[in-house]
Amino acid sequence: MAITTISAQSSFAVGAILNATFGSMVEVILFIIMLKKGKEEGETCYMELVKSTLTGSILCCILLVPGLSMVTGGLKYRRQKFNPRSANISSSLLFVAIMGVFAPTIFSKIYGNLECEQCQTLHTNSTETNGTDTGFLCSGCKTVTIGPDNDKSLHWAHVEPLMYTCAIILPLSYLIGLVFFMKTHSTDIFAEFEQLQQEEGNRYLLLFLLE
C-alpha cells in the first residue's frame, strides 16, 4: 500500500522502480529464512523449494504479468503504444539478468558429473555383433559438481567463482540501470515519449473539436 501511495504521487519511472525494488522484499526475506533453516537442519528440500519459487516468480513477472497487461489493454484499446527506448533498455537488463541467473546452472550441467541413486545392469542379445550388449538402467539421476571421493576441485575452481561473479554483476547492473533511468538519460527516455503522447492527444482533441 505504501509503494502504491508513493507511486501515485511521483512519476511513472519512480513508481516502477520502487515497485520493482521493494515489491518482492517479503519473498526475499522468506527465501533467506528458508535457506538458513535448511542449512541448520541439513535438509535440501528447503533449497529446492527456494529454487522452484524463484523460477515461478521469474516466469510470472517476465511472462504472465506483461502478457496479461497487454491482453487486458488490447480488450479496451484497439492500438497501444509503448516507449521504445524504455523497452530496449529493459530488454537489455533482462537479458543480463537471465544470463546471470542461468550461467552457473548451465556451466554445472555441461561440466558436472552425472550421479544416480540406483542403477541396474541390463544384458541384451545383439544380432549384429552375435554377442551380448551390456547397458545400465538408472533412476534418480542428477548433475553434481562434486566428483568421486568428495572431490570438489571443479566446484571450488570454477563453479563457485562464477556464482560469486554473477551475484556481484547482477546488483551492479541493476544500480547502473537505475542511474541510467533516473539521472543521466531520464529526459531522453521519458520526456520525449510523454511529449509525443501529449502532442498526439492535442491533435486528436483538435480534430474532435473541428468535427
Image (cartoon, rainbow, N blue to C red):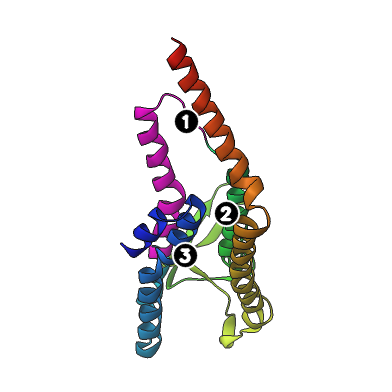
Give the labeled residue for mark 2.
94
In the rendered structure, which disc, 3 or 2, sits on the residue that comes first in sequence? 3
Viewer-nearest residue: 161 or 10: 10
Helix, strand or loop status at disc 2? helix
Q: Could you say which disc has been placed on residue 80 in the image? A: 1
Q: Quadrant of residue 42?
A: bottom left
The numbered mark at residue 21 is: 3
Q: Tell which tag, 1 or 2, sits nearer the viewer.
A: 1
| Residue 88 at x, y percent in the picture | 62, 45
Q: CA distance from mark 3 to mark 1?
A: 26 Å
Name which residue lies at 58% across and 82% down: 148
Give the mark nearest the N terminus, 1 or 2.
Answer: 1
**Crowd class of label 1 (few under 14; some 14 to 19; many from 20; radius 10 Å):** few
Magenta stretch bounds? 53-81
Residue 173: x, y in percent?
63, 64
Q: Residues at badges 3 and 2 in contact (C-beta under 8 Å)?
A: no
